[in-house]
Amino acid sequence: MGLGALALLLSILLGWAGSHPIPERKSFNKLLLISFDGFRWNYDQDVDTPNMDRLAREGVKAKYLTPPFVTMTSPSHFTIISGRWIEDHGVIHNMMFNTETGWKYSFKTTQNKTEWWDNGVLPLWITAQRQGRKTASFHYPGGGAKYQGEAVQRSLVESYTHPDSNETEWRENIDIVMNWFTQEDFDFVTLYYGEPDNVGHLFGPETERRRVIIQQIDRTIGYLVEAIERHGLTDHLNVIITSDHGMTTVKKKPNVTEILLTNYIKFSDLVKFHIVDYGGFGMILPKPGKEEILFQTLKNAHPHLHVYRKDEFPERFHYAKHERVLPILVYADSGYNINAQLIIYFNKGDHGFDNDLMDMKTIFRAFGPDFKKNYLAEPFDSIHIYPLMCKLLGITPEPHNGSLAITQEMLTDSSSQQPGEETLGSSVFRNTAIGLGTFVGILTVLFVIAVTYTAVQRKKK
Ligand SMILES: *[C@@H]1O[C@H](CO)[C@@H](O)[C@H](O)[C@H]1NC(C)=O
Ligand SMILES: *[C@@H]1O[C@H](CO)[C@@H](O)[C@H](O)[C@H]1NC(C)=O
Ligand SMILES: *[C@@H]1O[C@H](CO)[C@@H](O)[C@H](O)[C@H]1NC(C)=O
Ligand SMILES: *[C@@H]1O[C@H](CO)[C@@H](O)[C@H](O)[C@H]1NC(C)=O
Ligand SMILES: [Zn+2]
């Protein structure tokens, strides 16, 4: 073997090393976010929930979670998925409305309406996709819209006739999601269930029917844990289980004086458009020149009704700044529904009330390879879930109103570093390490070849 052969061998070796970089191990685990609509923080305390109890021991449980105001489904879900206050993301109500035409679109109808959701704030699906993650939404509010022209890679939108509480279908949905993770390598999936909200509205939160649906949810969570094991995902999938708001019993006559706005104001004279009759919160667009008289008349109308001009709405709600919010806002004390001209509202339970009220608080549970075990977290605002999810997925977050500092203690690796925030020191060190490694590798190869060559030459002699 001559020097020419040696050079050839060397170039082949180096070429091989160059064109076959060692595949980088994925530095993040998959993430499943599940929301059970209207799951009040203490719903598991008056009913047997063995699976949720087990999860608390094997993962993280927050004492409770504070949703944003207004405590409604679409606004709250969009805060979870974007980390932004409602006045920033603009999904200010479950109902989409047009004050010119007077049209109102229901929660389900809005699910396909991009113009209701896409207000310049990006939900995590889109941000994650742009950073190379594969994402999907299963019935999660907002998952059916396009953002800056981009759709969620896989999105199922709840149909008008979708049953809320079919346990068999609940399990099938879990199987579908598990297959998305294992067979199609999705990284981030959001899964939404319409219970226990539906039962809470229909029968009220302090009823046997509500306790029964909580047991159904608990069995479903048990099924989820089994499915994760069956699919070999136990060490690769983090799960967050949360919700959008709580529920309180609606107060009715003769026990209380119900709030009926037409008792105080003449709608045809003062009101151009309103979005009232949806629980404990409403907004009114006065007729031109009628704002002051409307405000003054309503202000002290009912002892349990709070009336504000838009620019005086309490700052702590982070709600009123958005341009969609109408000039007069009204909200009621716990359990008082606000009715416009008729009491047509038959709900026994409702939400939409002040997010400081304990009945509006909701749940946060988490488990998986990156979460501590048997960790009881202090209560926190749902706005902080977003940076936590970004951290878990290795995503650089968009500007947001949350803070990873609030939630990072839940993680086994609770260093606060976000991906993309790699410090100069660590990247210099890493690059130096890679450089040194390569250099030492080449030297070793040269040394081995040189020794072999010398040995062969000696033998020949
Ligand atoms: C949303 O759009 C899909 C596809 O066009 C359609 O099948 C579905 O019925 C729509 N759902 C709603 C709630 O409008
Ligand atoms: C519940 O869902 C299963 C599976 O989707 C379906 O076969 C069954 O008919 C449903 N049951 C009811 C009562 O709708
Ligand atoms: C009135 O209050 C009583 C006692 O709390 C309760 O049992 C009853 O259901 C209430 N009635 C209505 C109509 O809310
Ligand atoms: C929420 O975050 C956005 C984006 O960073 C910012 O513009 C806004 O002022 C923040 N809101 C509050 C109340 O801090
Ligand atoms: Zn509801």
Image (cartoon, rainbow, N blue to C red):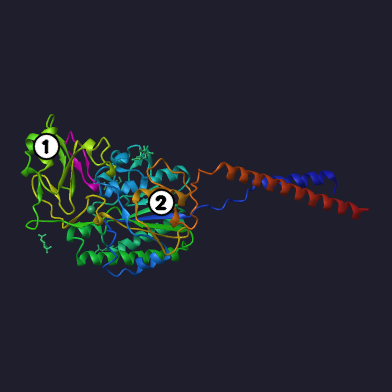
- Residue 236 - label: none
Name which residue type carries label 2.
Answer: Ile
Indicate the quadrant of ligand 4 in the picture: top left
Residue placed at 14% from the left, 49% from the top? Answer: 304
Residue placed at 7% from the left, 34% from the top? Answer: 269
Identify residue for label 1. Answer: 296
Above or below, 355 relative to 231? above
Q: Left of 397 or right of it: where is 285?
A: left
Residue 22, given in percent of the width and then of the height, sits at 62, 51
Of residues 333 and 6, the one drawn nearer to the viewer in this rendering: 333
Q: Left of 82 or right of it: where is 340?
A: left
Residue 222, given in percent of the width and then of the height, sits at 36, 67
Contact (Cβ within 8 Å) of mark 2 with mark 1: no
Name which residue type carries label 1.
Answer: Gln
Residue 362, given in percent of the width and then of the height, sits at 30, 56
Stretch in magenta: 94-108
Main SS, magenta residues? loop
Residue placed at 9% from the left, 55% from the top? Answer: 256
Indicate yes or no: mark 2 CB to ligand 4 under 8 Å: no
**99 within the magenta span:** yes
Secondary structure, mark 1, is helix
Above or below, 373 relative to 27? below
Within 10 angstroms of label 2, few (less than 14), some, or many (20 or more) residues?
some
Residue 192, given in percent of the width and then of the height, sits at 32, 54
Query: From mark 2 to mark 1, how far is it between C-alphas?
Result: 41 Å
Above or below, 159 relative to 400? below
Q: Total number of numbered labels?
A: 2
Of residues 327 and 300, the one drawn nearer to the viewer in this rendering: 300
**10 within the magenta span:** no
Identify residue for label 2. Answer: 406
Of residues 24 and 392, the one drawn nearer to the viewer in this rendering: 392
Residue placed at 57% from the left, 41% from the top? Answer: 424
